[in-house]
Amino acid sequence: MVRFVLHGMAVLVLTAVTQLGGIAWLAALAFRQGGGRFWAAFLLGYALLMGAAQLAAPSFGRVPLPSREGPLRMQSAFYCIAMRNFVSPELREVAIGAAERVARQHPGAVTLALDANFPLPAPIPMIPHLSHGDGDKLDFAFFYADAAGYAPGRSASPIGYFAFERVGEETCPPAFPTLRWEMRWLRPAMAGLKLEPERTTALLRALLDDPRVGKIFLEPPLAARLGVSGGKRRFQGCRAARHDDHIHVQL
Ligand SMILES: [Zn+2]
């Protein structure tokens, strides 16, 4: 019974994090006699599903964002391994175009993408996001600097999210339950980098200038600090997650 519950939890978590990993786990259960074979079967099954998803995704209007090269990259290999780097072809053009513009204005600038969408359409959104499900939503990391200046390809947080700029300066009234976590307990894991305003603002302007972009979410005080208030730049409201640790873009 305990095993059944644990396997069920593993399938749920893998499905939430990677969309297809739960299927690989279930298939590997057929090989669970002998621990080594289970893990080999799981990894092989997951690799096969990853390959199949890359082939199938274009039929559902999804293409992967580049993982590790060019002016636009995923912030970490995790996003590619978990297949969280899929967008519509139009959004990929928008994202690469914006990253190229930032790199022209600031040579050597690397734009880092965070959560995009899964390769296949699904009835539930990509947790913890409320909206990343249709291929037209994408998050970007801020640009960061250390004492020597712009730090290419680096983020304050190991996964790009949760290095909040406005800890202790809440815009919304207290509420429960809330998605506006501050996650102060995570502060020791942060790299001690500072937001680099020039390149971050250049990316925001490139996205705002693209007529295909419908909305950008960024906390209003941070948008004011970066000089990009108003227009398509919106506040996501007090009921959604904070946007002072990343930029959310949708077509
Ligand atoms: Zn988002």
Image (tube, helix red, strand yellow):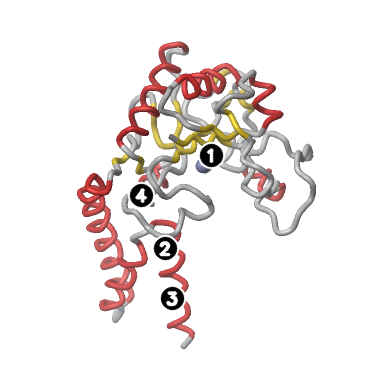
Question: Callout 3: helix, strand or loop?
Answer: helix
Alpha carbon of mark 2 to alpha carbon of mark 1: how far?
A: 20 Å
Alpha carbon of mark 3 to alpha carbon of mark 4: how far?
A: 21 Å
Badge 3 amino acid: Gly
Residue that mark 2 sits on: 14
Badge 4 amino acid: Met
Question: Across the whole image, how many numbered discs are drawn on residues?
Answer: 4
Residue that mark 3 sits on: 8
Residue 74 falls left or right of residue 228: left
Q: Quadrant of residue 218?
A: top right
Which badge, 2 or 3, comes first in the chain's sequence?
3
Which badge, 3 or 1, comes first in the chain's sequence?
3
Q: Which mark is residue 160?
A: 1
Residue 55 falls left or right of residue 114: left
Which badge, 2 or 1, comes first in the chain's sequence?
2
Which badge, 4 or 1, comes first in the chain's sequence?
4
Within 10 Å of disc 4 (Cα), the crowding (few <14, some 14-19, many 20+) is: many
**Residue 98 percent coordinates (x, y):** 42, 22
Question: Callout 4: helix, strand or loop?
Answer: loop
**Residue 23 percent coordinates (x, y):** 32, 67
Q: What's the residue at 39%, 43% (across, down)?
A: 77
Alpha carbon of mark 4 to alpha carbon of mark 2: how far?
A: 11 Å
Q: What's the residue at 33%, 28% (across, down)?
A: 93
Which badge, 4 or 2, comes first in the chain's sequence?
2
Residue that mark 4 sits on: 83
Q: Find out if the beta carbon at label 3 lies less than 8 Å from the nearest ligand 1 atom.
A: no
Residue 54 falls left or right of residue 87: left
